[in-house]
Image: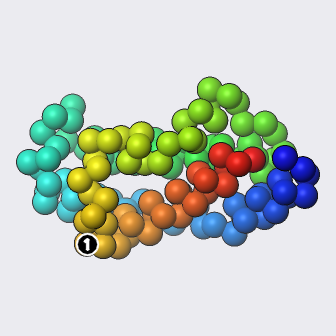
Amino acid sequence: MSSIDRSNLITELKKLNLTNGFPYEDINLIQENYNNFLPGLKEENQLIEDFNEFQLLIAGSGTYAIKGRKIPSFQKKYLANSFFERYPYYSFLEGELGKYPDFKEELEVFEAAREILWKV
């Protein structure tokens, strides 16, 4: 990838707001509304933990990219998968995201960042 392409991708990454508040209210509501889909998860706040892990991976990778450093290969491999690919047990939510606007917005922003980082 040329430095011009990389520079454009980094510029696009910087435009994304990765510092919004965490969508706790929506995630708690999801857990309440879909507890029958979530019983196989290990603990009550698993969705919070999984989404937080997803965001941290992307934010951390973004820090590497913005500073001009190479994203470690073990970390970059996780960027290949969307949230629902990485956590398939939440796939039932894909068609329900409109009910949870804060969660949907955060997911969309972080997915856009993930796609950029995958290309860097």
Residue 105 is situated, as x and y percent measured from the top left of the image, at 44, 69
- Residue 86 placement, left or right of 2: left
Q: Which residue is found at the position 65% from the left and 46% from the top?
A: 118
Asked whether residue 29 is in view, the answer is yes
**In this orientation, which residue lies closer to the viewer: 120 or 15?**
120
Residue 42 is situated, as x and y percent measured from the top left of the image, at 21, 31
Taking the view exactly as shown, the residue that stands out farthest to the top is: 74
Q: Is residue 104 above or below residue 49?
A: below
**In this orientation, which residue lies closer to the viewer: 114 or 85?**
85
Please name the residue that numbered disc 1 is placed on: 99
Q: Which residue is found at the position 53% from the left and 64% from the top?
A: 109
Where is residue 68, by image quadrant? top right
- Residue 44 placement, left or right of 115: left
Describe the element under mark 1 as helix, strand or loop: helix
**In this orientation, which residue lies closer to the viewer: 93 or 31?**
93
Q: Which residue is found at the position 50% from the left and 42% from the top?
A: 81
Taking the view exactly as shown, the residue that stands out farthest to the left is: 36
Residue 78 is situated, as x and y percent measured from the top left of the image, at 54, 36
Residue 106 is situated, as x and y percent measured from the top left of the image, at 46, 63
Q: Is residue 44 above or below residue 113?
A: above
Taking the view exactly as shown, the residue that stands out farthest to the front is: 1
Q: Which amino acid does label 1 sit on?
A: Lys
